[in-house]
Image (cartoon, rainbow, N blue to C red):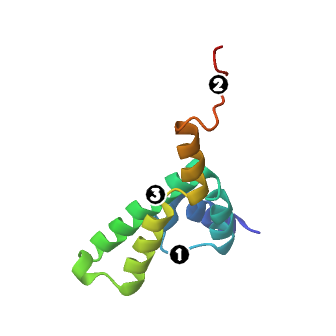
Amino acid sequence: MNRQDIESFFKTLLLGDFEESHNTAGEVIGGLIALIPILGQVMAARDVTGSIYAIGVKGGFKNATPVQLVNLGFAAFGAIPSRRSVTVRTARACGGHSRRRRAR
């Protein structure tokens, strides 16, 4: 692995959809990091922003390619919390489970 490969890996990992040429290892590691609840949503928000930026550079939505629109859709879908996360948060909010000890 040379310096160029390492730079490409970190560019893909940090820039997401802002980077046009993606490094495969960076995509895989980014996908694993995206499984972490809050980090996944932050990365999805970064990708939504990057997709909108890429569409804007090409002249807006009327000039966007189908691939750019699909990428935007997947990124937006990734920003939605998982069902498990929503269920757990809802259960906690309804008093089903609380980390704080209840005063007696």
Nearer to us of marks 1 and 3 is 3
Judge depth for marks 2 and 3 and give the one in front: 2
Q: Give coordinates of residue 63: x percent, y percent.
A: 25, 83
Tell me if residue 91 comes above or below residue 36 in the rendering. above
Per the image, the residue denoted by label 1 is: 21
Tell me residue 1's x, y (percent).
77, 69
Which residue is disc 3 drawn over? 46
Mark before the other along the chain sequence, 2 or 1: 1
Kind of element beneath mark 1:
loop
* Crowding at mark 3 (Cα within 10 Å: few <14, some 14-19, many 20+): many
| Residue behind mark 2 | 100
Position of 5 relative to 88 (above/below): below
Q: Residue furthest front?
A: 104
The amino acid on which the numbered mark 1 sits, given as a three-letter code, is Ser
Which of the two discs, 2 and 3, labels the residue nearer the N terminus?
3
Which residue is farthest bottom?
66
Q: Real-space Cα distance between discs 2 and 3? A: 33 Å
Instruction: Tell me what residue is drawn at x 41 percent, y 73 percent.
Output: 73
The one nearer the camera, 27 or 85, is 85
Residue at image position (29%, 77%) is 58
C-alpha gap between disc 1 and disc 3 = 16 Å
Tell me the residue at 51%/60% (across/down): 15
Q: Report x, y in % for residue 19.
A: 48, 68
Closer to the camera in the image, 63 or 1? 63
Q: Earlier in the sequence, mark 1 or mark 3?
A: 1
Say whether residue 20 is left or right of residue 89.
left
Quadrant of residue 45 in the image?
Answer: bottom left
Type of amino acid under label 2: Arg
- Mark 2 vs mark 1, foreground winner is 2
The numbered mark at residue 77 is none
